[in-house]
Image (cartoon, helix red, strand yellow):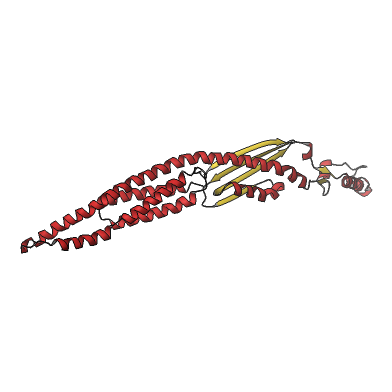
Amino acid sequence: MIRSMTGFGTSAADVEGTHYSVELRSINNKFFKATIRLPEELSVLEPELESMLARRLTRGSVTLTARYSDTSAAAAAAINTAALDRYLQQLLGSPGLAKGLGHDAVRVDLGALLALPGVVVADTGEARVESARPALLRLAEEACDRLVAMRAREGRSLHEALHTLGDGIAGRLTEIAEAAPRVVEQYQERLRVRINALLAESGTLVRDEDLLREVAVYAERSDVAEEIVRLQSHLGQFRQIIDDPGGEPAGRTLDFLAQEMLREANTIGSKSSDAGISRRIVEIKGAIDRIKEQAANVE
């Protein structure tokens, strides 16, 4: 069955004192486009996450947002005690500094000391990345499962709408196929009446062979049987695509097929001068336009 391109999925878990969460959103796009939003220290995981999304999804603008909060002791940054001792030795062992401040001893502000270069040593991030990688990849897969399930649910609504439009086109096409032969017969009768009216004053009648020759030219020019067969074939392919149980991505194929259906409908409309057929062609073209709109939502 076909799937929509819009969807949402999320997943979260606590792993060794760290809370991870992944959120996925997707909207319509003619092609696949992934936007990955990660904490700066985990940005090296972006290619792996994008590769996973490209493997699971084929169309749409997809945004993945990952967050984490570490409440474990490992979240604390390390203090370089050697550097801190060196700063303290310089401050406390400087009599000139103490004299300049007018005190026998220098009062030390630990907060200011911690802000000095080299005192607080941040984690290089390698350990953080290694611990976050399996958790984020697993959560991204789970969020993607939920997004795909939502796309499938919306796809069922699209499937119903597309089936209704296809059935409407098929019904109008059947009416056109039934009406087309009568159009030639009606043209022949109208032509006979018109010509006989024009020749009545001279007392002559149109010969059947001359009339049939003119009717044959009109019939050849207005014959839409070939276009009807092609449009019916396109409709058969259209149903196969939207009913495919494999759920293969079909959005681009449906868009191309709708263009081909519109081409045949335009040809039928241009060949026929019958008001009834023209009215049905307008309805068919309207349905095809709606198919194109719906196909823009299909993965």
Query: Is residue 279 in view from this perspective?
Result: no
Name the residue located 20 percent from the left edge and 53 percent from the top edge. Answer: 186
Q: Residue at x 68, y 36 (%)?
A: 13
Q: Determine whether, in the image, residue 85 is placed left or right of residue 163.
A: right
Q: Quadrant of residue 143?
A: top right
Q: Is residue 244 above or below residue 220?
A: above
| Quadrant in the rendering for residue 92 | top right
Task: Find residue 295 and report its horizontal and vertical position in percent.
Answer: 46, 48
Task: Measuring from the top left, give residue 245's x and y in whole percent.
Answer: 50, 42
Instruction: Give the image location of residue 246, x and y in percent.
Output: 52, 44
- Residue 170 to residue 184: above or below: above
Query: Relative to 90, is 146 above or below?
Result: above
The answer to whether one can see residue 45 in this image is yes
Which residue is pictured at 56% across the width and 51% down the height? 32
Left or right: residue 212 compared with residue 30 = left
Of 23 and 92, which appears nearest the observer?
23
